[in-house]
Amino acid sequence: MTASSPARVVVVGGANVDLKAHTLAPVILGTSNPGLTTQTAGGVARNIAENLARLGVAVSLVSAVGRDNLGDALLDDSKLAGVDVRFVLRVNEHLTGTYTAMMNHEGELLVAVSDMTVLMALTPTTLHDRRAVLRGAAWVVADGNLSEPTLRHLMTLAAEAGVPVAFEPVSVPKALQIRSSLEAGLPPHTITPNLLELGALVGRSVPDVLTDIRAAADELHAQGIHTVWVRRGQSGSLLSTPGTYTELLTVPAKVSDVTGAGDAMLAAYLAALLSGLAPAEAARQGHAAAALTVESTYTVSPMLTREAVRERLEESREGAGSQSD
């Protein structure tokens, strides 16, 4: 990357179609519930890539989708949003991945089923064939949808290219995909677990108590991970670097759909870092992006821009100042 070229991020992992059902009233189990359904482009890696593009960051996506109508639509939507999809693998033997979620009438997730079988095609070999995309990148973002061998090979390629990696665990089982990379001395620079995923990474339950969260983060620092950003739901988050802990509050929002909030947080955080902001302020912008996202019915808010993020963060600060008065 030359001084005149823009910073570029490479995102590697899941791209799928989100199928979401919202009930119109409190859920009654074991029977049909009146509701609404939507279909949007999704997938953790793809969502992060689109969020980055909407925030003005040059971004390339490495993933796998089927040669089917859903795959065509997914790539068209991503490209239209500004994502470079030239490195996405088209697969004949599997259908494009889907994420089917059931949300209650308040927009909170009840249960979800993720079918990411198509990502089996994203092997260490197919990833190696796409290694040129890493050249000159400012960051690599990897999600836990990658198989353990593929993730480990990505960590190797990123280390060889001198590019820091941010790892989004995705879920408790998928968080463990990073273990063999850690054992091989290939830690990501940054990791963004929630409390359950943090517990999986350290091998024990971690309660939502700052001293416990800090202790768990320190264990990950000892394994070579520089930044541990722990999402605590309504309690906000804790941004931890070796010897420094910053507690961050959520930005108030009227929840419509929580899907994609974490993806927006990480994208806005990286976009802010690339613009020169300090990590703590970048994380605050991440919280503002999450607030904009949960207020949208879309997995990636079409209203997301750098200006919208800054305005939302400023509004929350003004509101907090008024309350303290």
Image: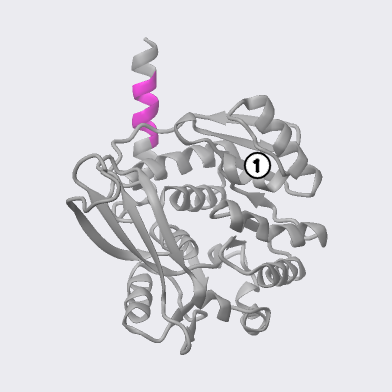
Q: Nearer the viewer, residue 62 or 273?
A: 62
Left or right: where does residue 153 sit relative to residue 257? right
**Residue 84: % across, % down:** 45, 74
Taking the spot 74% from the left edge, 44% from the top edge, the residue there is 220
Vertical comparison of 324 with 214: above or below? above
Q: Main secondary structure of the magenta part?
A: helix
**Residue 324: % across, % down:** 39, 12
Look at the numbered disc 1 and give the secondary structure of its residue: helix
Q: Nearer the viewer, residue 150 or 282?
A: 150
Quarter of the image with the N terminus is bottom right
Colour scheme employed for the rendering of this structure: one colour
**Residue 39: % across, % down:** 27, 65
Taking the spot 73% from the left edge, 48% from the top edge, the residue there is 225
Taking the spot 45% from the left edge, 77% from the top edge, the residue there is 85
Give the residue number, with chain letter if any, for mark 1.
Answer: 199
Q: Nearer the viewer, residue 127 or 175?
A: 175
Quarter of the image with the C terminus is top left
What residue span does the magenta drawing correspond to? 313-320
